């Protein structure tokens, strides 16, 4: 979507594009699943933010009743150490969502910087960055994450950092792609002819156009990050107990006996991962449809 | 085209070298080594020292890297620290199962995803479209280990239709059917993720193509709808689908690690996990190198297919 | 579908078929009946069904290799045990039974041990097992060029140093004739200790196969990947890497041919093991440490109609060690406080569902040397706080507790320990890491406390763990009196005298703790009801595999 200025703006002022956001929002609204997804995700974010007030118990408080089924006091029962499952699920929302958001934020920033550099300057900078991204993409990311996390030790920060350092190639390519397409366009040439500085061009005109695909990619990326954290926990390399995360709550109950006889230990966590990831994906899908100028809605 | 491929291969070599250097240093600089793992009441201090020496762990790191590269040049991947078996042999016996699993998963995924993707693009907004979109999104949202355990529970325990894991029945005759029943669940679990993303990708690229002018032209010329869609439409949409093939493959190799763990599938994924936890440097290096080579090959392959399929592209 | 994908489909199907076949060519072979299945008979006549003489044992991790002198300590030696023999073996009653040695004499002064080899003992290639093989094996282990992990096991023998090494042939091992070997110990020693270490823990190697190989080339020798020449009740057939090991009956076994035809050791994940047990795909789990039922599946296993669930006390235990180089651990009251500050009973009752024992010393109830006079210390947060205050503990200090990944119960116990200590007022931070990282940090002294486990032989000598500068004394606990007593204990021959020494040691450790002994988990295993004569115990499973039979 090309944000062409409607007129030559007075010094220092740019026209605002409310209409663009409203336009996008209206299109988004038509995707019912996306709206549902957005509502759920918002709820989850609220739960995560207000966790200490929402959770009935301290998630790390070791109780006396181990692996107890749901009851009046413990709505979702207790885990192997007598801790309240519901409270752990609520605090786990914080952890799992943060891992998703933080790692994606890291790689979006890296990706934008590198992609912009590659796309704008071209030449050896472009080649170097693209080859570097080849190297990163060359690796089954899970394997790389596994190696690194095993070696530097499992912890929430390490997981965020590793996921964050590995995800940038896709973003960089998107940004670079946008720059390559737009670089030759008239308004950029015109801007340059008018003497506008590179940075201004980049920030004011090129980046906003790369914004939509990056946003969509980031949304799907968050879902992937949450799944990756869950997978790492399955392998024992994710966020470690006593800190609760949806992923490690699921691992705690890996045995077939528990699968059969203690559903409260895995259904909530597994279900929540699935729900959260699905809803984030719905939102991404909706965003993508809403932001695609060629899609007639 | 040949020279393009040759150039790509030549560029790939330093990339691979770089990958091995980074790998080697990360892995060797990690705390703990293979000897630290050995807790055995029967060991004396002299035994410990000898173990370290025998594994070459007393050499400084650059010397060790140089030795590894030197061996590599001679086609020798070294000896596994934990099993004392040649690394090439250890990896060799695991590559087959992993390839079987990932290729089967990939083929299954594409066979399901492409037709559905095409149909949902041609019948946009129908219930098929919505249904498949949801299915696609579900496919990429389910944690694979969760699905795997669930499937074992249902199909193995409750319904007793399929084995709980492994590649073959132990002590049995082997054979194609035995192989197949062990392969079904892992392939489905591994492939589900791909089905989701390939389906959506197919759908969106078909949608783009369907809007193209040349499609309207074909219809105006009176070409049968089916031919329009499949011959003209899909062939053009195939290009982006082929490009993601290598990503899918890479993703599958990574995803295979978890699937192999759940189903006790004796593949590379399990080997890598074991090797890392045992600090078996030669095996880790060998496995990583192999994966990197495979990925480079897949990229080249998909580029080559891309060039064949899209007449607009020329690599000269 | 239609024409468009004609070509593509064809190509894809060919590729798939090739891939499956490629994977196939690795695996299919052997045998005429899959494990666990009964062949069908067509006629309804009540002829007894043919017995399934294959037995499958499940184990959770693959062995590293099959070297009888250098494989990993648990999974590897289990795999080796089926096909190699030692001089003697410990049975489930904790008595020594003959293996390669049919009888043995101990000199009155407890220094000389003479083993008379069974005249019928033969290698799998038909050659007789002779004293030469025994001498060869011990000299090999003592050789400084050999890579082995049995050095400490043979250091009681005269002519070896503290690490079990010698510069030439070991003086204390001699072949008296073709079927008699004589060992001389450095000093008078407890015969049980000698028998257990030298007699029951060293697998004899065939000299005629390996004698010509230079010791330093042995580690990569093909023999240790496929050991076809053993002396045990079963012969090696094949190892499908990471999946299973197959053995066939040794018809010429000198103690009587086994009734079973084939043995399979199947490697699988613990959490899918219950499914396999239920379906009869597996006949039993491998036992203490290497094939135990996960605690969350224990209730289920006890209800299985085709399995006998077995549980017993083992030799192993879990403990929390202190980094004694940190000066805040110097006061014994601080360390005693931890015994009161951790609810060990809660761990056993809830994490182990009662299937475990709280310890006050490094000896589990199975040891004859347990000091039963030590008063058990239960969880008492107030007592702990009192002791810490008396010792001048800084309650703002945060301790780093490092925990290895891989043992679920141990990981969970860390959470309980942290919560308990929090109650006492001690701040603890848990750091989880994989095993080699943990060992590296312990080696460097970069920790406050660590959780770790141990399992040893029946002999009470714990020098390798608790003596000053011992190989496994990472906590660096050092007391001259303890060292003195340990040395004495190792070289005292008579039981009562030894008991006094080890009792005194345990008292010292009670009052001036080296580590916090946490718990000894009972082994949780299962054996199929169709098996007969299987006698699994803390001493092992395979000691009498040649006597096993099946009902069906």
Image: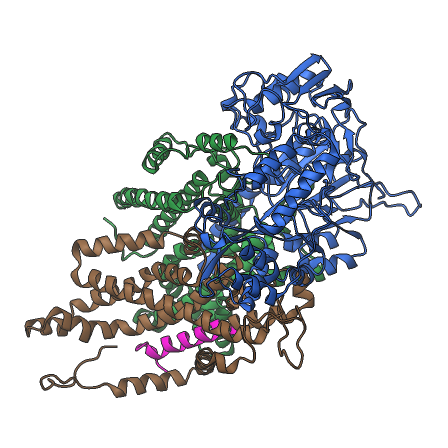
**C457 is higher (above) or lower (below) than A109:** above
Q: Position of residue C8 (x, y in %)?
A: 45, 54
Residue at 46%, 70% (x, y): give it.
A95
Which residue is at the far right? Answer: C46
Q: Position of residue B68 (x, y in %)?
A: 37, 34
Classify residue B172 by image quadrant: top right
**Where does the C terminus of chain C fall, quadrant-wise?**
top right
Classify residue B234 by image quadrant: bottom left
Residue B60 in magenta? no
Which residue is at the far front? Answer: C390
Q: Is residue C279 among the parts visible in the rendering?
A: yes
Q: Colour of chain C?
A: blue
Q: Is residue B206 among the parts visible in the rendering?
A: no
Residue A293 in magenta? yes
Classify residue A281 by image quadrant: bottom left
The one nearer the camera, B33 or C382, is C382
The one nearer the camera, A109 or B27, is B27
Q: Main secondary structure of the magenta part?
A: helix
Q: Position of residue C26 (x, y in %)?
A: 57, 39
Q: Position of residue C360 (x, y in %)?
A: 66, 52
Q: Colour of chain A?
A: brown
Q: Colour of chain B?
A: green
Residue at 68%, 34% (x, y): give it.
C81
Which contiguous range is marked in magenta?
A275-297
In the figure, is residue C331 to the left or right of C301?
left
The one nearer the camera, B229 or C279, is C279
């Amino acid at each position: 979507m090309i944000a062409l200025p409607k007129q030559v703006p007075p010094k220092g002022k740019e026209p605002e594009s409310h209409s663009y956001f409203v336009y996008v929002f209206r299109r988004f609204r038509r995707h019912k699943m996306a709206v549902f997804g957005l509502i759920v995700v918002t709820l989850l974010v609220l739960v995560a933010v207000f966790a200490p007030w929402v959770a009935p118990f301290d998630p790390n408080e070791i109780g006396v009743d181990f692996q107890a089924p749901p009851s009046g006091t413990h709505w979702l029962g207790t885990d192997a150490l007598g801790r309240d499952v519901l409270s752990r699920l609520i605090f786990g929302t914080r952890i799992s969502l943060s891992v998703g958001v933080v790692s994606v934020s890291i790689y979006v920033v890296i990706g934008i910087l590198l992609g912009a550099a590659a796309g704008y300057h071209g030449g050896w900078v472009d080649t170097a960055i693209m080859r570097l991204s080849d190297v990163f993409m060359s690796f089954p990311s899970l394997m790389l994450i596994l190696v690194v996390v095993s070696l530097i030790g499992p912890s929430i920060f390490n997981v965020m950092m590793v996921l964050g350092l590995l995800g940038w190639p896709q973003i960089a390519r998107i940004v670079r792609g946008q720059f390559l397409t737009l670089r030759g366009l008239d308004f950029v040439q015109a801007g340059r002819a008018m003497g506008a500085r590179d940075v201004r061009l980049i920030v004011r005109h090129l980046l906003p156009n790369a914004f939509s695909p990056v946003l969509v990619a980031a949304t799907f990326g968050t879902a992937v990050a949450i799944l990756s954290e869950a997978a790492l926990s399955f392998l024992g390399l994710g966020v470690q107990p006593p800190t609760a995360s949806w992923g490690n709550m699921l691992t705690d109950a890996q045995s077939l006996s528990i699968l059969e006889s203690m559903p409260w230990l895995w259904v909530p966590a597994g279900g929540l991962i699935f729900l959260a990831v699905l809803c984030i994906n719905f939102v991404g899908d909706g965003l993508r449809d809403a932001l695609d100028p060629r899609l007639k809605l | 085209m040949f020279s393009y491929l040759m150039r790509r291969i030549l560029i790939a070599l330093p990339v691979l070298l770089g990958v091995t250097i980074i790998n080697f240093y990360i892995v060797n600089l990690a705390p703990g080594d293979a000897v630290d793992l050995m807790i055995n009441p029967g060991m004396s201090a002299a035994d410990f020292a000898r173990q370290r020496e025998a594994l070459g762990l007393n050499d400084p790191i650059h010397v060790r890297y140089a030795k590894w590269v030197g061996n590599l040049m001679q086609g020798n991947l070294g000896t596994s620290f934990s099993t004392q078996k040649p690394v090439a042999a250890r990896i060799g016996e695991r590559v087959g199962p992993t390839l079987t699993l990932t290729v089967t998963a990939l083929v299954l995924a594409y066979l399901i995803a492409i037709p559905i993707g095409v149909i949902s693009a041609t019948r946009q907004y129908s219930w098929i479209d919505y249904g498949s979109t949801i299915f696609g999104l579900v496919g990429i949202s389910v944690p694979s280990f969760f699905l795997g355990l669930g499937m074992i529970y249902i199909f193995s325990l409750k319904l007793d239709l399929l084995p709980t894991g492994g590649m073959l029945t132990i002590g049995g005759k082997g054979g194609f059917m035995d192989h197949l029943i062990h392969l079904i669940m892992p392939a489905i679990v591994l492939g589900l993720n791909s089905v989701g993303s390939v389906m959506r990708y197919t759908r969106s690229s078909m949608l783009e193509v369907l809007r193209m002018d040349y499609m309207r032209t074909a219809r105006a010329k009176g070409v049968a709808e089916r031919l329009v869609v499949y011959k003209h439409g899909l062939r053009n949409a195939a290009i982006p689908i082929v490009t993601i093939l290598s990503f899918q493959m890479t993703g599958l190799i990574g995803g295979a690690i978890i699937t192999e763990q759940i189903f006790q599938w004796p593949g590379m994924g399990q080997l890598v996990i074991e090797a890392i936890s045992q600090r078996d440097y030669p095996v880790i290096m060998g496995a990583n190198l192999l994966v990197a080579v495979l990925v480079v090959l897949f990229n080249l392959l998909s580029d080559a297919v891309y060039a064949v399929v899209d007449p607009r592209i020329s690599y000269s | 579908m239609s024409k468009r994908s004609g070509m593509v489909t064809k190509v894809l199907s060919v590729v798939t078929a090739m891939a499956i076949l490629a994977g196939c060519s690795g695996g299919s072979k052997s045998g005429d009946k899959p494990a666990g299945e009964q062949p069908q008979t067509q006629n309804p006549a009540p002829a007894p069904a043919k017995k399934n003489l294959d037995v499958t044992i499940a184990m959770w991790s693959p062995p590293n290799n099959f070297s009888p002198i250098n494989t990993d300590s648990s999974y590897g030696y289990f795999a080796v045990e089926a096909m190699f023999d030692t001089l003697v073996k410990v049975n489930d009653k904790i008595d020594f039974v003959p293996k390669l040695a049919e009888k043995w004499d101990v000199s009155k002064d407890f220094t000389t041990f003479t083993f008379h080899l069974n005249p019928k003992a033969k290698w799998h290639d038909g050659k007789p097992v002779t004293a030469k093989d025994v001498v060869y094996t011990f000299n090999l282990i003592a050789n400084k060029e050999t890579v082995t992990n049995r050095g400490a096991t043979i250091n009681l023998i005269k002519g070896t140093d503290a690490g079990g090494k010698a510069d030439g042939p070991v003086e204390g091992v001699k072949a008296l004739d073709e079927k008699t070997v004589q060992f001389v110990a450095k000093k008078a020693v407890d015969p049980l200790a000698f028998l257990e270490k030298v007699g029951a823990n060293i697998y004899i190697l065939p000299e005629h196969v390996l004698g010509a190989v230079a010791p330093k080339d042995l580690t990569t020798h093909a023999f240790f990947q496929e050991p076809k020449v053993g002396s045990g009740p079963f012969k090696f057939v094949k190892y499908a890497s990471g999946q299973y090991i197959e053995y066939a009956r040794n018809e010429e076994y000198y103690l009587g041919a086994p009734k079973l035809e084939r043995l399979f050791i199947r490697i699988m994940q613990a959490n899918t093991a219950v499914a396999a047990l239920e379906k009869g795909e597996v006949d039993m789990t491998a036992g203490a440490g290497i094939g135990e039922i996960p605690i969350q599946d224990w209730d289920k296993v006890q209800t299985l109609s085709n399995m006998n669930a077995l549980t017993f006390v083992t030799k192993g235990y879990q403990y929390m060690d202190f980094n004694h180089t940190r000066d805040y651990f110097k006061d014994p009251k601080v360390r005693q406080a931890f015994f009161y500050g951790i609810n060990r009973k809660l761990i056993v009752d809830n994490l182990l569902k009662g299937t475990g024992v709280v310890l006050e010393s490094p000896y589990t109830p199975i040891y004859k040397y347990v000091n039963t006079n030590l008063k058990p210390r239960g969880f008492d947060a107030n007592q702990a706080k009192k002791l810490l205050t008396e010792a001048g503990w800084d309650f703002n200090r945060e301790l780093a507790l490092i925990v290895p990944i891989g043992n679920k119960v141990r990981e969970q116990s860390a959470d309980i320990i942290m919560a308990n200590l929090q109650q006492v007022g001690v701040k603890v931070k848990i750091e989880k890491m994989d095993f080699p990282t943990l060992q590296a940090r312990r080696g460097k002294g970069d920790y406050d406390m660590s959780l770790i486990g141990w399992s040893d032989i029946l002999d009470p000598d714990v020098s390798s763990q608790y003596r000053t500068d011992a190989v496994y004394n990472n906590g660096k606990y050092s007391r001259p009196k303890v060292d003195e007593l340990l040395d004495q204990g190792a070289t005292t021959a008579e039981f009562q005298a030894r008991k006094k020494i080890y009792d005194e040691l345990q008292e010292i450790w009670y009052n001036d703790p080296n580590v916090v002994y946490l718990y000894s988990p009972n082994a949780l295993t299962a054996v199929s009801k169709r098996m007969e004569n299987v006698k699994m115990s803390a001493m092992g499973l395979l000691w009498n595999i040649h006597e096993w039979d099946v009902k069906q």
